[in-house]
Image: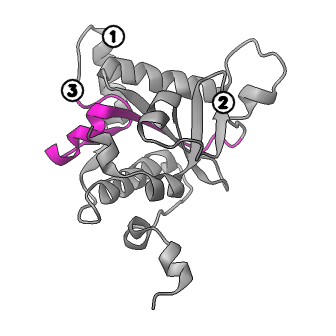
């Protein structure tokens, strides 16, 4: 009989544990790690290459948009490298942020009246803008601050579609955004919810 700890370990994590490192390129490395975990989850544990980080972390799509041009499958930070992943990237645009330890999503809630948006609001706005350019149904924002848990944030409407109900870790009503632990996201949500 399997031990209790192994039963609670998500299958994707047994196959592909997240490696969180430091250094100059930690943001890019974190994006690549997230893409591998997403790939493994999406493919039912068969592949780690269904998704990869977009060219220049979505920069190419941003530059083309300034010229009134589109860039299929390159908005946000995650692109499908195989047709198998297209239903996911056509459903949501994914933005990934690593570091920023001096900022917290709670800055939006507990800071005195600010003359400018919090860093978290800026991230949500960026994810929303990328999703609108890509014409997807919504967005996901994956964040990892130093020595903190990895979190996945999304608009309320996407949470409702994924049937999360009240099973989330944090909610920001003024932004219409909820947050859920990264591992919990993969345990609770099936890829089939993104194929509808």
Tell which of 193 and 120 is nearer to you: 193
Residue 176 falls in image quadrant: top right
Q: Which mark is residue 150?
A: none
Range drawn in magenta: 72-101
> Marks 2 and 1, Cα distance to the nearest angstrom?
31 Å
Q: Quadrant of the C terminus?
A: top left
Furthest toward the top, the residue is 68
Residue 150, position in %: x, y? Answer: 57, 51
Q: Residues within 10 Å of mark 2 (few under 14, many from 20)?
A: some
Residue 73, position in %: x, y? Answer: 24, 31
Q: Residue at x 30, y 23 (%)?
A: 61
Residue under label 2, please give it: 172
Callout 2 secondary element: strand
Callout 3 secondary element: loop
Residue 47 drawn above or below residue 194: below
Residue 164 drawn above or below residue 36: above
Residue 60 visible somewhere in the drawing: yes
Residue 69 falls in image quadrant: top left
Q: Quadrant of the N terminus?
A: bottom left
For marks 2 and 1, give the one nearer the viewer.
Answer: 2
Tell which of 105 and 74 is nearer to you: 105
Query: In the rendered picture of this protein, how many numbered marks are placed on residues?
Result: 3
Q: Pointer 2 and pointer 1: residues touching (CB < 8 Å)?
A: no
Q: Which mark is residue 66?
A: 1
Q: Is residue 114 left or right of residue 165?
A: right
Q: Residues within 10 Å of mark 1 (few under 14, many from 20)?
A: few
Q: Which mark is residue 72?
A: 3
Tell which of 162 and 179 is nearer to you: 162
Q: Pointer 1 and pointer 3: residues touching (CB < 8 Å)?
A: no
For marks 3 and 2, give the one nearer the viewer.
Answer: 2
């Amino acid at each position: 009989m399997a031990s209790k700890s192994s039963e609670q370990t998500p299958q994707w994590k047994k196959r592909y544990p997240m490696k969180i490192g430091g250094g100059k390129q930690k943001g890019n490395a974190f994006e690549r790690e997230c893409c591998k975990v997403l790939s493994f989850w999406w493919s039912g544990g068969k592949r780690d290459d269904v998704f990869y980080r977009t060219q220049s972390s979505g920069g190419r799509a941003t530059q083309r948009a300034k010229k009134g041009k589109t860039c299929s499958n390159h908005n946000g930070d995650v692109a499908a490298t195989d047709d198998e992943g297209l239903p996911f990237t056509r459903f949501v645009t994914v933005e990934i942020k690593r570091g920023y330890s001096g900022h917290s999503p709670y800055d939006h809630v507990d800071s005195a009246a600010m003359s400018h948006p919090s860093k978290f609001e800026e991230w949500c706005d960026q994810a929303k803008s990328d999703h609108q350019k890509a014409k997807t149904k919504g967005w996901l924002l994956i964040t990892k601050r130093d020595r903190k848990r990895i979190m996945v944030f999304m608009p309320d409407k996407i949470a409702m579609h994924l049937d999360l109900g009240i099973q989330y870790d944090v909610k920001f009503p003024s932004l219409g955004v909820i947050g859920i632990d990264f591992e919990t996201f993969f345990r609770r949500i099936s890829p089939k919810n993104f194929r509808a």
